[in-house]
Image: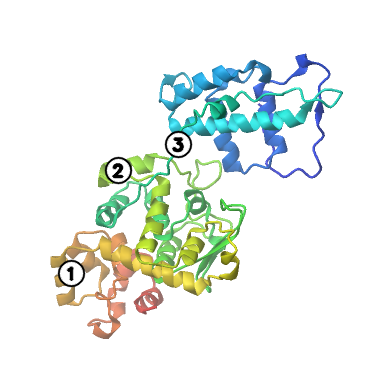
Amino acid sequence: MNKPSTAPLAVSPSLRVLSSPSEIPTLRQAFDDYCRIRTLRPKTLKSYKTNIKAIADWQDLKLTHITGQMCMDRFFEMKDGSTNKYGTRGFYFARQTFKVLHAIYEVAKAYYEDPDEKPLIVTNPVQKLTALRLWGRAGRRQDCVFPEELNAYFRGIQALPLATERDYLTLILLTGFRASEAAAVQWGWVNDIRQTVSIPGDITKTGTAMTYPLTALTASFIDFLKNKADFTDPASYLFPSATSHAGHISDDNRAYLKLKKISGVEVTRHGLRRTFGSYGDYLDISGYALRKLLNHADNSVTAGYVIATVDRMRRAAASIHTFMLDNIGVEPVIEQKLMKTGSHCLEHIAQLADIGLYEALLLFHKGAYFDASRRQAPLNRHLEVYEKLGLTLADIKRMNTKE
């Protein structure tokens, strides 16, 4: 199969005139034409190819040889999770596969015609699923990390063996980014002066560029990533991968399966994003500010009159982070020890709470432990500890400053 172009067509496509029914294209040819005519993002194209592979035994059949009965039989086989040589699939994948097939046929009906300008493809076999109401209801998933599970889940993230996976999933949890957005973030998108991350429209699902505000927590987390990164030139990724074709980490289910085993909490990649949004709703954050943070499209008339500023979004994100840190927490007895000692040494906190330096960095933002007015020891006394985290004295002073 030729590799289809994902670039928008510069000119209007010429309809394909077929002189006889014997020239009717195969599914393989029709899919290539579909990808050439439609403007598909690389991720969408990859997903569609995966769907088409599930009906690979049909690819050399002419479009007119695929029947409604064949579509119904294969749909139910895939929906029920039956195993064939093309793999085991489920309900959501079956729906997506046949929606892609439906779209291919709709384009084919308009694209292929005879010399008299009459369509050669007049029926769409997938339409049988609609006419007989066989699609079934695709209810929205409801998985998220509930507040009482957050401590176990966060510790589970830090227990993952690969540092890139740990950092990547932490960023999604702290920002609510879509998995594909978080994976593709480049250092050039991080603005240290404005304390924002700007994600271009060709990366976001909505096609709209997004400016995400960094709070003290996410800013220091990104500083943490920067200080241990091999390359931080503008075009390099926060989460590079030498094995990925894209050059950055590729999101898959393996990390989530590991997390389920470690933490006992089962959450999908989108469930982490749903977690961020659910916490915002629990805190009664404005729906408009929350939509902006999640970069959801909102075409309502009212939305056109509400401008959510970066500072307003930053305050909303900071509230969610405070809620997260409160629920990650440490044992009360540990908290009492920390309050009593008044120590500001991250290594000491890590030892008392039986956690790693990485987790201690997040607890650093709980002001009760690091109130500057109660500091008993000079910050530079613990520089060697901060250096282990890749932090400078200026970083520590800035992180101790309340927003």
Please say whether residue 2 is visible from this viewpoint.
Answer: no
Amino acid at pointer 3: Arg
Q: CA distance from mark 1 to mark 3?
A: 48 Å
Q: Residue at x 25, y 44 (%)?
A: 264
Residue to which mark 2 is pinned: 260
Q: Is 74 placed left or right of 322 in the picture? A: right
Q: Nearer the viewer, residue 213 or 128?
A: 128
Vertical position of residue 332 compared to residue 33: above or below: below
Q: Nearer the viewer, residue 299 or 43?
A: 299
Q: Which residue in the rendered view is the most extreme toward the bottom?
A: 373
Q: Residue at x 26, y 53 (%)?
A: 149
Where is residue 5 shown, x and y percent of the image? 69, 38
Amino acid at pointer 2: Lys
Where is residue 189 shown, x and y percent of the image? 56, 62
Where is residue 43 shown, x and y percent of the image? 57, 42
Residue to which mark 3 is pinned: 137
Q: CA distance from mark 2 to mark 3?
A: 27 Å
Residue to which mark 1 is pinned: 335
User: Sequence order check: which comes first, mark 2 or mark 3?
Assistant: 3
**Which part of the image, by quadrant, shows the C terminus?**
bottom left
Q: Residue at x 34, y 77 (%)?
A: 400
Are the residues at dot 1 and dot 3 in contact (C-beta closer than 8 Å)? no
Amino acid at pointer 1: Glu
Q: Which residue in the rendered view is the most extreme toward the top?
A: 22
